[in-house]
């Protein structure tokens, strides 16, 4: 295959995987050779090659094979560094200026903050009041009392909103602070780019010179060994300097699979706060605030009594879906020039309401519990009475009773034909243990969130 042919494949990959992925992962690699069924590529680092192989290898092979080659396997290698001739000293690249986020300097290259995500627009209720209070404390910018602050919860419960609100408040109160907010994915991309460009020292200096580091969705770095290594050292360096760190994830540190134990331990040293799934009162409060905003945007548009209450009852998945439903409803009513009534809401939001009504099955619960406790599904349903299997089985029975409308005899049939009294005993056992076993309570809370989210 010629370079021109590889160029055509690259152009096809832009469309296939998107421009951002192409720029970050495909553009830096170079086709070194094509021998028989093996295409060899030069990559900046081993980690880089592993990532490309795992995530885009099939796409590359597909496009190469569609041409005039019979490629079935890819190989990635890091070229040996060019050595300076004897007696000469290899030139070092000139040091680059480290970006600052002070008002007078260029801002640190973090993610763009959403102007809507402030503390004023955050609706506080029982499920999120502790997280809100902790975020407020950090945003005051006083002495660091808990470090890091770790916020976790399911999709659309307000983690990112609070992260942005903290950053906004810190910048308003102390403009001189160097505040860096970014996603874990962006952290990884910048780290890989620094490795590729041989500017790792600039990377280290930039991240370790901030006053406040905020990393969203930290679960993304799980399993990425090199990124975890750098994150760990960055974390330690900032903690040692008494700099504030704020982290968010979709689950508690100890529950993030493939995250190094030393990082889990570090993340648990500060304050770990759970944003619980929304309750009816919180959902209604969010809708009322959003409706007030839309009334100013859509002058004269009326919303009938009971519509917001109906939506708060029916749409229980997450806040994003809830807010999106109200946005659509106001836009539709404005376009057709009608009052927002219950009938209009049911017609306009039929698809969202149907999705919200999706019923969990016992089989889904069994699969999720088996996965969580790392046991075979066949053992969970089967006759084995080992404690390591019996307890997860009882957890699944408990969740089946509380998350599905199925009767005890029906649940028993799904658990290998067990009698309804056995199911009742399992449920009661879990209810008794919940009061004294905090780990079990945490497991149940996580499983509920995963199954209902």
Image (cartoon, rainbow, N blue to C red):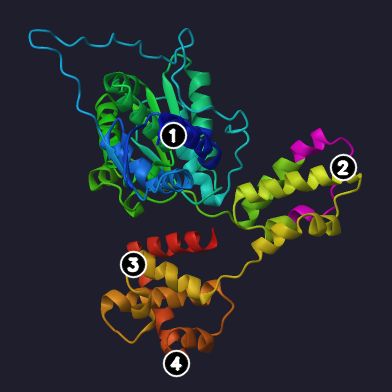
* Distance in Å between CA atoms under marks 1 and 4: 64 Å
Q: Which residue is rendered at x = 48% and y = 84% of the image?
A: 414
Q: Tag 4: Cα neighbours inside 10 Å, few (<14), some, or many (≥20)?
A: some
Tag 4 secondary structure = loop
Report the quarter where the C terminus lies. bottom right
Q: Which residue is mark 4?
A: 419
Point out the tag, 2 or 1, that comes first from the N-terminus: 1
* Distance in Å between CA atoms under marks 3 and 4: 24 Å
Q: Nearer the viewer, residue 170 or 12?
A: 12
Point out the tag, 4 or 2, that comes first from the N-terminus: 2
Q: Which residue is mark 1?
A: 6
Q: Which mark is residue 313?
A: none
Q: Which residue is rendered at x = 29% and y = 46% of the image?
A: 264
Point out the tag, 3 or 4, that comes first from the N-terminus: 3
* Picture coordinates of residue 226, whole percent (x, y): 27, 37
Tag 2 secondary structure = helix
* Distance in Å between CA atoms under marks 3 and 2: 51 Å
Q: Which mark is residue 373?
A: 3
Looking at the rendering, the stretch of residues picked out in magenta corresponds to 292-309
Q: Tag 2: Cα neighbours inside 10 Å, few (<14), some, or many (≥20)?
A: few
Mark 2 or 1, which is nearer the eye?
Answer: 1
Q: Which residue is rendered at x = 75% and y = 36% of the image?
A: 293
Q: Which mark is residue 335?
A: 2
Q: Nearer the viewer, residue 11 or 344?
A: 11
Q: Is residue 241 above or below residue 17?
A: above
């Amino acid at each position: 295959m010629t370079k021109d042919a590889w160029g055509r494949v690259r152009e096809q990959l832009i469309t296939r995987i998107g421009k951002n992925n192409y720029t970050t992962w495909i553009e830096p690699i170079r086709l070194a050779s094509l021998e028989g069924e093996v295409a060899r590529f030069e990559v900046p680092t081993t980690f880089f090659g592993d990532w490309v192989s795992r995530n885009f290898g099939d796409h590359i092979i597909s496009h190469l094979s569609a041409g005039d080659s019979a490629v079935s396997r890819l190989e990635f290698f890091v070229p040996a560094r060019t050595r300076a001739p004897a007696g000469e000293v290899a030139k070092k690249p000139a040091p680059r200026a480290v970006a600052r986020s002070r008002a007078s300097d260029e801002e640190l290259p973090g993610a763009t903050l959403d102007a809507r995500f402030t503390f004023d627009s955050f609706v506080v209720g029982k499920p999120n009041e502790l997280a809100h209070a902790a975020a407020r404390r950090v945003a005051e910018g006083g002495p660091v009392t808990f470090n890091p602050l770790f916020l976790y919860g399911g999709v659309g419960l307000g983690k990112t909103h609070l992260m942005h609100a903290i950053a906004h408040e810190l910048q308003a109160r102390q403009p001189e602070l160097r505040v860096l907010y970014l996603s874990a994915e962006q952290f990884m991309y910048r780290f890989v780019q620094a490795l590729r460009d041989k500017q790792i020292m600039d990377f280290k200096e930039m991240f370790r010179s901030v006053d406040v580091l905020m990393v969203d969705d930290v679960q993304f770095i799980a399993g990425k060994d090199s990124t975890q290594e750098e994150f760990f050292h960055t974390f330690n360096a900032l903690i040692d300097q008494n700099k504030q760190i704020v982290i968010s994830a979709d689950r508690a540190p100890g529950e993030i699979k493939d995250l190094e134990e030393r990082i889990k331990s570090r993340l648990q040293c500060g304050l770990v706060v759970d944003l619980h799934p929304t309750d009816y009162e919180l959902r209604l409060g969010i809708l009322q605030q959003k409706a007030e905003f839309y009334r100013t945007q859509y002058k004269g548009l009326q919303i009938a009594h009971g519509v917001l209450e109906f939506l708060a009852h029916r749409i229980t998945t997450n806040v994003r879906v809830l807010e999106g439903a109200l946005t659509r409803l106001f836009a539709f009513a404005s376009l057709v020039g009608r009052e927002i009534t219950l009938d209009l809401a049911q017609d306009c939001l039929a698809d969202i309401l149907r999705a919200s009504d999706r019923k969990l099955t016992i089989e889904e619960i069994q699969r999720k519990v088996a996965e969580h406790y790392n046991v075979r599904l066949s053992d969970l349903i089967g006759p084995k009475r080992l404690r390591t299997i019996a307890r997860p089985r009882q957890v699944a029975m408990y969740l089946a009773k509380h998350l599905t409308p199925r009767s005890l005899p029906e649940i028993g049939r799904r658990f290998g034909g067990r009698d309804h009294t056995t199911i009742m005993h399992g449920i009661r056992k879990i209810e008794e243990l919940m009061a004294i076993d905090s780990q079990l309570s945490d497991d149940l809370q996580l499983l509920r969130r995963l199954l209902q989210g």
